[in-house]
Amino acid sequence: MGRFWNEMFWSNPEFVRHRRAELRPVRAITIAAVVAVMCVLLGLACWSYEQNLLENARRGAETFATDAWKFRLDQLQQEFARKTWLLFYRWLIGVQGVALTFWTLFSCAQSVSGERDRKTWDFQRTTRLTPAEILIGKLMGEPILVYFAVLCAAPVTLIAGLAGGLSFGIVTSVFIFLAVTSLFLGLGGMWLSTLLESRTRGVGLIGALALYGLTLGAYGMRESGLPGLAAISPLTGIIDMVLDKTDTPFRLAPTLFGREVSWLLMNVLLCGAFIAWLAVMLVRNLKRDYQDIRPLSRWQAVGCAAFLNFLIYALLSPGYSANDVYHETRGGWFPDAKAVAMFAVAMNGLILFLMGLATLTPQERLKVWRRKRASGESAIFADDGLPWPWLGISAVVAYALMVWGLLAWDHTLPLEMGTLQTAAIRLLLVLVFVMRDVLFLQWCVLTRLRQPIVKGVLFLGLYYAAAAVMTVLAGVVSSESGAMWMLALLTPVQVFDPKIAGLAFPAATYAGLALQTGVIGGVLMAISSRLQRPLRVGAAA
Amino acid sequence: MIELVSLRKEYDNVLAVDDLSLTIPPGEIFGLIGPNGAGKTTTIRMACGLLAPTLGRAMVAGVDVAREPERAQQYIGYLSDFFAVYEDLKVWEYLDYFAHAYKLPESDIPARVTEVIAQVNLEVKRDAMIRGLSRGMKQRLGIARAIIHRPKVMLLDEPASGLDPKARLELRNLLLSLRDQGATILISSHILTELEGFCTSIGIMERGRMVRSGRIEDVTAAETSTRLVRLTWVGDSLVAAQGKLIAALKNDARVSDVNLAEAAGTFRFSGAEEDLAGVLAALVGANVPVTSFSEVKQTVEELYMKLSTHEVM
């Protein structure tokens, strides 16, 4: 076991390479010195701040000589050392948390694309290193400078935390929290990096910034109906876990299946699950040629869609807890089972679209599938076939989980049969629109567009913008019902009308369903026609 | 040692390699030649597992490269035309990294690194940072990387691109020594003189297909029904010598295209090598003062020009 860990981590050739290249003695000493100086400066700043507060209190006590001022002065004097250390600890952990997560994300986001640019990647791919070894080596090696800096600051942070009155468990938990979040961000960055070429570097940078922004922004989810999602934000680790309980009366905690759990547990579970999915995608694709990258197999995509659906019901917090100071806010998110079902349908629009993107088939593979299918060697559900049957399977699984989830929450959010019927039609409509959009992107992949998926998504954005304009025009030119018809025919927005009960959707909704099914048929024919085009002979390499 | 079975590669709307089958036995140096865009690089990249074939399979030392990539890599040494090295490492660190990446036994690695550094004449730069090396030295380091794990098969894609003449000669000698140690080499190039006198077999690719392949003498024999023989003579007047030569050769039906100049000449001969010895004996018997008599071998370039259809993509 020890040998395995040694080979996988400490002696991992990729990790050793980074260690040797980036942590040469002079650089290591410099980093340690910079960390020491920063610690001293931060410490002095914190001491100065607390000293200032104390001086102000002393002057106040001398000036006013009231009992309140004396009491405040006594309290500050008694607590001076602890408060100074605690402030110092908060600053230390804040700086480390931001540096660790940001650096890990951005260094990993350049790991594979950087090697491709430098033309060293092919040589790594032709070694005997397995994708898992490369992944671990890069994840541990790319941000090695920041790991080392954090390691240098760790003893001071530990002492500051303990002297600040925090327990050893809390201090350790915060470190674990930040480490797990960093690993998640690092893997996210590495995944972005595998999808990038030099010409798409700008897109990668935007993607990395967006990922960081989303992760940080997840902090705001503490007050939502899915508070557990805040556990992936490093801010939760930096702020909530080290809150001085004497400073705040609030008690915020995430819920798992309706039970309150610790932030650390939620972080480990949530980030651990995302880390596992990212690792699956990376191990599957890391040694593949850029053209052959496909994030997930079809069954993995269905599994991932199921997992994301499962999260909705596992993290749900309807706001019934008496201890929950955000009772009202959370209750506002999910007042009843209908709201949960509608939220799940909306989320499935996004989930199915992402699954569709992850399972788009490269032109080369699709052509082979078509030839095999023509000769009866391949089935419609084959891994190299079109993604639409798998979107259907994912939607069925999502609906099954919705039924299970709503039944499981029946004790808190009573479920009516009509809710499930409405949700089924809503999910069907969302599925049809997503299927159309994903097949359009598949068609884009078969064209000669450069960056077909990026351009396809932009075209879809244009389409929805045009649909919005047409809806407004229809409202202006005819009547409100005209606008409703336009909206229902061209977009899935109308299915989220909260007034609909059971199967009583307006006729326009069913007309939209029929129209979009016809459009899907048209896109399938266009794809088939593209696949029948003869090949040009000659190398492209 | 290398077996490519019905390999096919499609890129979007382009058929880069079409139903290519090839077997290269152990110890061969196989030259893959063809114009730019013929599919040589794609073929080599599929053979070393960098590119997944659309159809077909590539086997190296009996291992399917796509199915067992990590196992196949222990037999493969790959070098491409334009590559880079990790500039922030020292020479020995770079080779040590790849020795570990190829999973050589830990105890063998230091000695092997030293051995390979000596093989590519970089002893004095062992502890130097790579960023300070010249381009030629980096190329040699790349070659050292490709052979660090003693591969049975070398897959070289235009390996001499950008090398100066001295470095090319060193590369050729290194590859010949690897062949002598039992390695099988597949080398692609469109500079035909680079492969001259070096390859034992050739394959000519055009438009993604293998036009012809096999041992050079077999391909030559298949393409030419007659041998071109060149001879020189001395010690007699031109007219007398030519007269004797014509007399000696004219009665032989296998001789054609006799072309005689002042003291040298050529003719075509359609018989076997043993029969050619008989012609020499007849000339000597006719008192022609022959000083040299040899078959003119076709160069790879001539062979390529003859076989190629010159279709440019």
Image: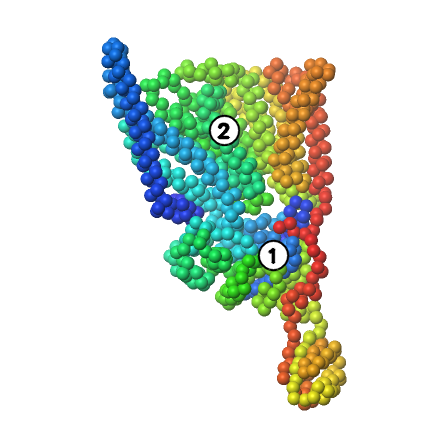
Q: Quadrant of residue A23?
A: top left
- Residue in front for this viewpoint, A341 or A187: A187
Which disc number belongs to residue A135?
Answer: none
- Residue in front for this viewpoint, A87 or A349: A87
Kind of residue indicated by mark 2: Leu
Q: Is residue B306 above or below residue A179?
A: below
Kind of residue indicated by mark 1: Leu
Q: Quadrant of residue B213?
A: bottom right
Q: Quadrant of residue A324?
A: top left
Q: Residues within 10 Å of mark 1 (few under 14, many from 20)?
A: many
**Residue A140 location (% of width, % of height):** 42, 42
**Residue A371 location (% of width, % of height):** 69, 45
Look at 39% across and 48% down and name the residue there. A20
Left or right: A96 as drawn, with respect to A306: left
For the rendered model, the colour scheme is: rainbow
- Residue in front for this viewpoint, B65 or A437: A437
Closer to viewer: mark 1 or mark 2:
2
**Residue A265 location (% of width, % of height):** 40, 28
Looking at the image, do the residues carrying marks 1 and 2 touch, with CB atoms under 8 Å apart?
no
Which disc number belongs to residue A214?
Answer: 2
Q: Chain of mark 2?
A: A
Q: Residues within 10 Å of mark 2 (few under 14, many from 20)?
A: few
Residue B171 visible from this viewpoint: no
**Residue B263 location (% of width, % of height):** 67, 83
Look at 54% across and 30% down and name the residue there. A306
The answer to whether dots 1 and 2 both sit on one chain is no
Look at 27% across and 14% down and name the residue there. A60
